């Protein structure tokens, strides 16, 4: 394992993770299709997971990897709920364009 | 048995009130009148029973319904005291009350709110009975306030006219000033004696030598202020003439015969207290005499028939206060009774005239009614002779007693009250001549409709005229039934009924001659020369001052009302505006913030997310920089 890390270098993992996270953030901010927004959120989540795993190897500590399992399990549950919400939004509004979801207006 | 009867006496008018309030509109005018009148007649019958009983046994009846307020050593019970004083008062309150109810059936028959009129009258009688039979100051105070309320309601009975509303408010406010005095008096008495019960106070005050002279005098003075408000004495008299805005039966019942004598009743009830404060008694006597004179001078030039009678009432009440101040309580009571007879008769008579003329009250537009309204004329003439003090009518005896007492005690007061009496004779005959003699001065249409009032109106007049004629026999000089009857009330030796010496005969002759002079002047001026009082604009000089009532209303307006208005205007415009600007400003600022914040909540998920990311970035930057 350390070989891989030595070959590539921890800083590259960090860069990749930051890039993925930023892609996720911009995806959330700029795209209007709710499913893509959702996918962007997943990308952010996975960017963080990646960082966890990388540091776990770097520090020779399994805790980070265990935490990622939990994080993925929660993410799976969240996806189920989120998609269900999207389906019901679509049924009610006929669209999943985030720009049109203005019912929260105070 | 007694308790039940007292409750019947008290509650009969109250039931009448309830009936007329809730069912009066449905059952029709005749039943309203009958129920209203009967409820008072029941009270009168019970009173008569008690009166006959006490006249034999001479034992006062004290009834304690329940303990009302009980704080440590301070106890007030809700009780009634039927002694000689309260029973004789009840007798003419319910008696004259019944007659006036009877009269009102016909007088108010055209009025659409007849049921509420009778309801108020019944309520008034209820409160008046409470006032009279209360066994302590607090129960009396309930009645005191209640009659004030009814007076207010009845003065403003025709509330569609703003003048009448103003008169009602004036009466109420003037009375409030007096009531404050009464309340302060109650407080002082309560703290001095630890009780408000009349009999207990009497025992305490007569058995122990009191070192609290100052506070007793203070209590007496405060109570006197209360009495002067209710009984229209200087300086609180101005409400009574304005109170004539109410229907005439109200003027007769409340503002002549019963309610305005409440002050005299209270002072007589507390005679033992006032006896301990000679300085206050002097004030009472002086105030009474001056009121009698001032009101009489104003009455000389008034042209409204009811205004003349109103000022005459104030003047007569002044005479009663004079008697009270001189310590001659039984004479004051005597004059209250005779005055109730003849003044009620006069007011009802004037009501009959006003009724006949369809609401005309100005004597300049009357005249010559003698033929058209013979019964009204004769009854009013008897009452006028009585009030003028002509032998042997009721007023002669009572007024003469007051003058004699004044003569014995203080010559200056005697002169003042004698002048007031002469003026009384003059203005009362002026009223008679202007109203009933010479030719009719109203419109042709009124002349065509002139008629004698129906028998429901004339029969109370006849009864009251008879009482005004013979009322004097209850207290004749030499043998006074009234003095003996009232004797148990007074701690000090009652003035022995004036024995008839030469001084007394001379005084009687002087009084009678004075009255005759007054009548003669009125005869010369208004009957022979047929002078008609000039129009308002033409009145000049002293007469103008009198006609405008010494400008007292204007003075009060300038001294009290205007400054208070200015002050409240200041508070409204400056203080309240500032305060409300502060409070409202705070609200406005909060509102503005909220309004701006609301714009953020535009429902766009994108914006929310954007804000979220920006904030997280800012937070991270902050933590990083730290």
Image: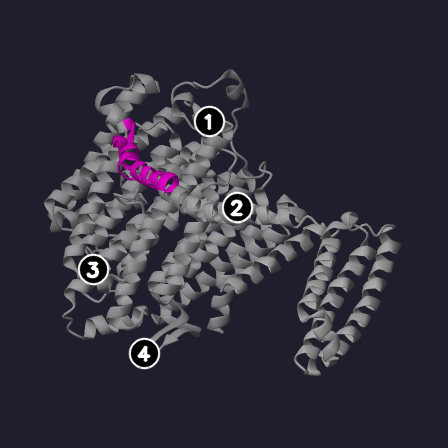
User: Dot 1: few (<14), some (14–19), or many (≥20) neighbours within 10 Å?
Assistant: some
Q: Is mark 4 on a helix, strand or loop?
A: loop
Q: Is residue B19 left or right of residue A5?
A: left
Magenta stretch containing residue B453, yes or no? Answer: no
Q: In this view, does B424 lie to the left or right of B575?
A: left
**Disc 3 marks which residue?**
B218
Are the residues under marks 2 and 3 on the same chain? yes
Task: Relative to B331, say whether B192 is above or below.
Answer: below
Q: Are marks 1 and 3 in contact (CB under 8 Å)?
A: no
Q: In which quarter of the image is residue B74?
A: bottom left
Percent coordinates x, y for residue B109 in the rendering: 58, 39
Circle number at residue B102 = 2
In this rendered view, identify the residue nearer to me: B587 or B536.
B587
**Disc 1 marks which residue?**
B360
* Start-end of magenta stretch: B547-574
Residue B96 visible at all: no
Q: Is mark 2 on a helix, strand or loop?
A: helix
Circle number at residue B73 = 4
User: Dot 4: few (<14), some (14–19), or many (≥20) neighbours within 10 Å?
Assistant: few
- Which chain is indicated by disc 2? B
Q: Spatial distance from mark 1 to mark 3, Cα to Cα?
A: 46 Å
Which residue is at 15% across, 73% downward? B209
In this rendered view, identify the residue nearer to me: A103 or B323.
A103
């Amino acid at each position: 394992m350390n070989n891989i890390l030595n070959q590539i270098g921890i800083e590259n993992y960090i860069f990749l993770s930051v890039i993925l996270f930023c892609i996720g953030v911009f995806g959330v901010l700029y795209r209007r299709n709710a499913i893509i927004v959702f996918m962007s959120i997943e990308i952010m989540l996975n960017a963080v997971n990646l960082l966890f795993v990388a540091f776990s190897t770097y520090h020779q500590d399994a805790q980070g990897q265990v935490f990622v399992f939990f994080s993925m399990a929660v993410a799976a549950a969240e996806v189920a709920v989120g998609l269900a919400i999207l389906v019901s939004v679509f049924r009610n509004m006929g669209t999943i364009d985030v720009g049109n979801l203005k019912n929260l207006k105070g | 048995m007694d308790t039940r009867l007292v409750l019947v006496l008290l509650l009969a008018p109250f039931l009448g009130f309830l009936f007329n309030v809730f069912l009066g509109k449905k059952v029709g005018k005749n039943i309203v009148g009958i129920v209203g009148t009967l409820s008072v007649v029941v009270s009168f019958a019970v009173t008569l029973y008690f009166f006959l009983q006490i006249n034999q046994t001479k034992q006062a009846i004290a009834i304690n319904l329940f303990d009302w307020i009980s704080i440590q050593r301070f106890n007030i019970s809700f009780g009634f005291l039927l002694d000689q004083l309260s029973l004789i008062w009840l007798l003419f309150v319910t008696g004259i009350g019944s007659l006036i109810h009877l009269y009102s059936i016909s007088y108010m028959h055209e009025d659409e709110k007849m049921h509420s009129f009778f309801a108020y009258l019944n309520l008034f009688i209820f409160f008046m009975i409470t006032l009279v039979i209360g066994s302590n100051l607090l129960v009396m105070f309930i009645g005191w306030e209640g009659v004030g309320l009814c007076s207010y309601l009845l003065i403003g009975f025709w509330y569609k006219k703003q003048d009448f509303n103003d008169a009602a408010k004036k009466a109420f406010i003037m009375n409030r000033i007096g009531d404050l005095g009464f309340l302060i008096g109650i407080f002082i008495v309560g703290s001095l004696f630890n009780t408000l019960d009349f009999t207990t106070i009497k025992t305490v005050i007569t058995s122990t030598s009191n070192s609290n002279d100052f506070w007793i005098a203070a209590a007496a003075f405060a109570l006197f202020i209360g009495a002067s408000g209710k009984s229209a004495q200087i300086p609180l008299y101005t409400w009574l003439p304005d109170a004539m805005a109410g229907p005439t039966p109200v003027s007769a019942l409340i503002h002549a015969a019963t309610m305005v004598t409440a002050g005299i009743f209270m002072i007589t009830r507390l005679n033992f207290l006032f006896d301990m404060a000679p300085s206050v008694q002097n004030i009472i006597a002086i105030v009474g005499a001056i009121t009698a004179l001032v009101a009489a001078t104003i009455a000389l030039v008034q042209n409204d028939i009811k205004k003349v009678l109103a000022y005459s009432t104030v003047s007569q009440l002044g005479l009663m206060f004079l008697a009270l101040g001189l310590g001659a309580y039984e004479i004051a009571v005597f004059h209250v009774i005779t005055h109730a007879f003849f003044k009620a008769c006069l007011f009802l008579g004037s009501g009959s005239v006003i009724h006949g003329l369809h609401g005309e009250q100005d004597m300049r537009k009357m005249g010559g009614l003698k033929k058209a309204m013979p019964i009204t004329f004769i009854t009013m003439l008897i009452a006028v002779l009585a009030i003028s003090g002509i032998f042997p009518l009721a007023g002669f005896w009572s007024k003469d007693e007051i003058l004699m007492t004044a003569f014995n005690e203080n010559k200056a007061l005697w002169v003042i009250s004698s002048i007031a009496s002469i003026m009384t004779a003059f203005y009362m005959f002026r009223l008679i001549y202007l109203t009933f003699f010479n030719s009719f001065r109203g419109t042709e249409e009124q002349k065509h409709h002139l008629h004698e009032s129906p028998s429901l109106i004339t029969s109370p007049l006849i009864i009251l005229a008879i009482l005004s004629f013979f009322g004097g026999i209850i207290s004749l000089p030499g043998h006074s039934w009234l003095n003996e009857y009232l004797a148990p009330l007074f701690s000090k030796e009652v003035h022995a009924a004036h024995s008839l010496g030469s001084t007394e005969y001379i005084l009687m002759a002087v009084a009678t001659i004075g009255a005759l002079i007054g009548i003669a002047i009125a005869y010369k001026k208004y009957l022979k020369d047929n002078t008609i009082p000039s129009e308002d604009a033409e009145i000049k000089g002293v007469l103008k001052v009198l006609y405008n009532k010494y400008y007292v209303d204007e003075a009060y307006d300038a001294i009290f009302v205007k400054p208070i208005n200015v002050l409240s205007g200041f508070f409204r415009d400056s203080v309240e505006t500032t305060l409300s600007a502060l409070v409202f400003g705070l609200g406005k600022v909060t509102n503005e913030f909220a309004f701006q914040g609301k714009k953020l909540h535009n429902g766009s998920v994108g914006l929310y997310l954007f804000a979220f990311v920006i904030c997280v970035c800012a937070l991270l930057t902050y933590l990083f920089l730290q």
